[in-house]
Image (tube, rainbow, N blue to C red):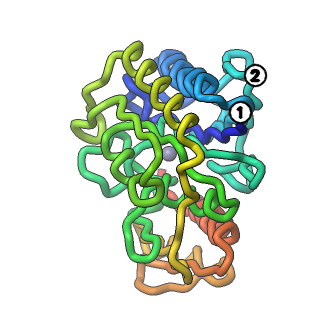
Amino acid sequence: MKLFLSTDFEGTSGVVAWEQIIEGSAEYEQGRRLLTDEVNAVINGAVQGGATEFVVNDSHHHMRNLHPQDLRGHATLITGRHKPLYMMEGLDASFDGVCLVSYHGSIGAEHAVLSHTYNPGAIWEVRINGEVVGESGINALVAAHYGVPIIFVSGDAVTVQEAQSIAPDAEKVIVKQSIGRFAASHTHPIVACELLRAGAQHAAQNISSMRPPEFKQPVSLEVTFLVADMAEMACWVRDVERVAPRVVALTNDSLLDLYRMFVTVVTLTRALVDR
Ligand SMILES: [Zn+2]
């Protein structure tokens, strides 16, 4: 059984501030330890549930948060920036399941610690077929394209709730309750890791009953930006259409190409983020 782990960082127990999860900050090493323990808890549990092969795609910020020698399960680690499939780089049809680890709520969610949708400096909201989605919903396009079920999701309560529609049968583990965008009540890391281990074991054991995410065709992905210039710039990409001053619609028959269009739009509009 071969599993793909897409690991973010904001959904780790103990994490509430950018300073804990951005390289070079004083608290970063502490954050990285907490994240690594959670990723390993998922791998250990999945091994107990029958998984034998792991590819971990570090998906947060500059994507060098995990160190290969610290990972359990002899996992292959994908790190570094500018990956064509970004948070889903490395996934293909050879995998049996996808685990979304340490994920977080979408930018507009209520009580979602460190909430954002890809780029908080540019993206105000993303909808797929009219429904507001977070990163789990967007990344599910790639899982759906390759026909691989999302079997496990972890983060705060909002993360789990947002993943419900794309992965109804996935094992979901809540490691903290968000109080606001920069505050949360954390399950103790030892307890959190035990929950993650047990959840991943259960997910692996039940993998045969899980189905890949489904999207009703034709799929339309709408991005609302913070400012109109970003929407203007997004239209430089073929098949991106302006539907309101700050809103563009992306359409493509291929779910993979739709995700790639989204990644292109995200990358392009970074040029207009105010700092
Ligand atoms: Zn994220």
Q: Nearer the viewer, residue 22 or 179?
A: 179
Residue 66 vs 211, above or below: the answer is: above
Q: Nearer the viewer, residue 244 or 106?
A: 106
Tell me the kind of residue under disc 1. Phe
Does ligand 1 reach within 8 Å of label 2's beta carbon?
no
The tag on residue 2 is none
Q: Are marks 2 and 1 in contact (CB under 8 Å)?
A: yes
Tell me residue 7's x, y (percent): 57, 37
- Dot 2, crowdedness within 10 Å: few (<14), some or many (≥20)? some
Question: With 173 as the anchor, is 52 left or right in this view?
Answer: right
Question: With 172 as the anchor, is 157 left or right in this view?
Answer: left
Residue located at (45% from left, 61% from top): 123
Count of marks overlaid on the render: 2
The residue identified by callout 1 is: 54
Residue located at (75% from left, 22% from top): 74
* Residue 84: quadrant of the picture: bottom right
Residue 237 vs 118, above or below: the answer is: below
Tell me residue 42's x, y (percent): 55, 27
Residue 172 vs 28, above or below: the answer is: below
Question: With 78 as the anchor, is 125 left or right in this view?
Answer: left
Question: With 217 as the anchor, is 167 left or right in this view?
Answer: left
The residue identified by callout 2 is: 74
* Residue 58: quadrant of the picture: top right
Tell me the kind of residue under disc 2. His
Tell me residue 219's x, y (percent): 54, 78
The mark nearer the N terminus, 2 or 1, is 1
